[in-house]
Amino acid sequence: MSSGGGGNGPAHTAPAPGSAEADPSPVSAARAALNAAIADLAALDTRTTGVEDLLALIIDSDHAARALTGFGQTWLHRSVQAGAFTDTGLTCADALSGLLHIDLPEARTRLRRSMLLTEQTTLTGDPLPPRMPGTAAALRDGAISLAHVTVIDTFLRELSPAVDAQTRERAEEQLADLARQITPATLRRAATRLAGWIDADGALTDPADRRRRRSFRISGPDRHGMYTAVIVCDAEGAATLELVRDTLGAPGVTLDSNGDRAGDSENEVGDSGDGKTGNRTTGDGKTGDGKSGDGKTGDGEIGAEAETVAAAAAAERVRDPRTAAQRDYDAVFTAITRTLARRDLGTTHRGLPISLILTTTVADLAARAGLALTAGGTALPIADLLTLAGNHPDDLDTWLCITDLHDRPLHLGRSRRTASTDQRLALFATDHGCTFPGCTAPATRTQVHHVTDWAHGGTTDIEYLTYACDRHHRQIHTGPLGWATTIAPPGHRWAGRTLWHPPALADPTREGRVNHHFHPGDLLRDPDPDPGST
């Protein structure tokens, strides 16, 4: 401990024999032993180690990692119960995300999992077993992995609420025992079969239960800049999508893969196939206007019409190079953009126009390289941005915000408390989303925040406005757990950016922090810096 002798003594003194500090706590001793064991393993030279010893190291280390993960569930849950994150001014998930440098969804998953795998207590202090006792024991034994835990957790969550508690407990115990012997993939198949046995006739699944499972998720991008959308829908949703697919997904109806609308230029439905416009033709080159094969009307009229339809369908297939899956995508895309263009959803959302809004820098636009960003947080290559600007379908408005090299706006003031549409667009171009450190909420899920509160003399000028999502906006207050915001002054490393100052209980210095999520370039160094600049 630090000396209290006013600087006259040594900085640290050795504890006296028999004092409380002479014997470390059991937790400190266990941590020291763990770190020592890891150091011993790290110091091993395994270049000449035999295969049997190498395999033993692999098995033992994996077993230990699994067991530590199991123990960690208990430690995490008890930390939360003890109020470990109470004084941070953040939610438990936000605090855990910052503590371990993990994504917020992962932090939420860990907190939820710790509740399922840890013993609970009643209001009177009586112990209760974990909600997944068999799974918790297997994980602490190092016999299963988190992938096994996820399979069992998913199985229990997807069971109908009508399944009684005793059946759930027996199913969890059975799957936990199986998990000790099989892989997660095989366990998933076994869980699916078990769910089918529990609800063999489907009587336990009602319409409300099916609607509870509906979801829509977008993930990505991958290295090609492509995103994956997954829809889980009920029968009504599937029927609606089928209608969209069957009507707008037919050959030649919607946009092709080059962004051309069917009915324009060479893709016009009704072309003869030779590049000339006109009526659809039959297989022999004659017009299919209901005449017979010799050009006269008569008994062959119906047959000629059928030939005309068949020939037109074949011609459409030739002219439309898209696969069925591509046509289905274009059908859904067209249905959505037409809905937005009709303004059925109104004209604004959180002060931003319900339109396609993009931002990029002057440098990237001039170089025709880099990425633009949409208000929803999607990265768009500049080449696609330029194409989109000239060919966006269905008259859906497109807003393009271009910023300088430092992503900062010019002055844009207002005498009213609420920010104007132009100011919100300017904020999107600079902040891109919530400015709280580590927050991933895009501009479409935020509100405009006065860095200096309007009630305290703050102005509605663009230099003093910023984006904050609903969750983090509520954490700005003057209480002991409140956060504060300021604008980084000139000369600061992040000049002009919004600084978030944590409560003094969490950080006595209250040093300002910025959000790098929407500005990853802040954290990267130029791989080929200018030799003349130092």
Image (spheres, helix red, strand yellow):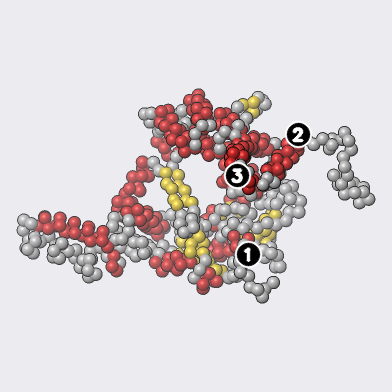
Instruction: Look at mark 2 in the image and give the residue it sits on.
Output: 26
Residue type of the residue flagged with mark 2: Pro
Q: Residues within 10 Å of mark 1 (few under 14, many from 20)?
A: few
Q: Can you give x and y, in whole percent of width and height, for residue 456 in the image?
A: 69, 58
Comes first in the chain, label 3 or label 1: 3
Mark 3 vs mark 2: which is more N-terminal? 2
Residue shown at the point (38%, 31%) measured from the top left: 202
Residue nearer the viewer, 178 or 375: 178
Front in this rendered view, residue 298 or 42: 42
- Asked whether the beta carbons under mark 3 and mark 2 sit within 8 Å of each other, the answer is no
Q: Callout 2: few (<14), some (14-19), or many (20+) C-alpha neighbours within 10 Å?
A: few
Q: Which mark is residue 107?
A: 3
Residue placed at 52% from the left, 66% from the top? Answer: 370
Q: Which residue is mark 1?
A: 525
Q: Is residue 414 visible?
A: no
Single out the mark in the foreground, 3 or 1.
1
Please, what is the three-letter code of the amino acid marked with disc 1? Arg
Mark seen at residue 234: none
- Give the answer, above or below, for where 412 lies relative to 172: below
Instruction: Note whether 60 is above or below 216 in the view shown.
Output: above
Task: Evaluate if marks 3 and 1 touch, with contact meaning CB atoms under 8 Å apart.
Answer: no
In this orientation, which residue lies closer to the viewer: 234 or 419?
234
Residue at figure coordinates x 47%, y 59% from the top left: 225
Q: Is residue 305 left or right of residue 250?
A: left
Where disc 3 sits, the SS reads helix
> Farthest residue toward the bottom?
532
Secondary structure of the residue carrying numbered label 2: helix
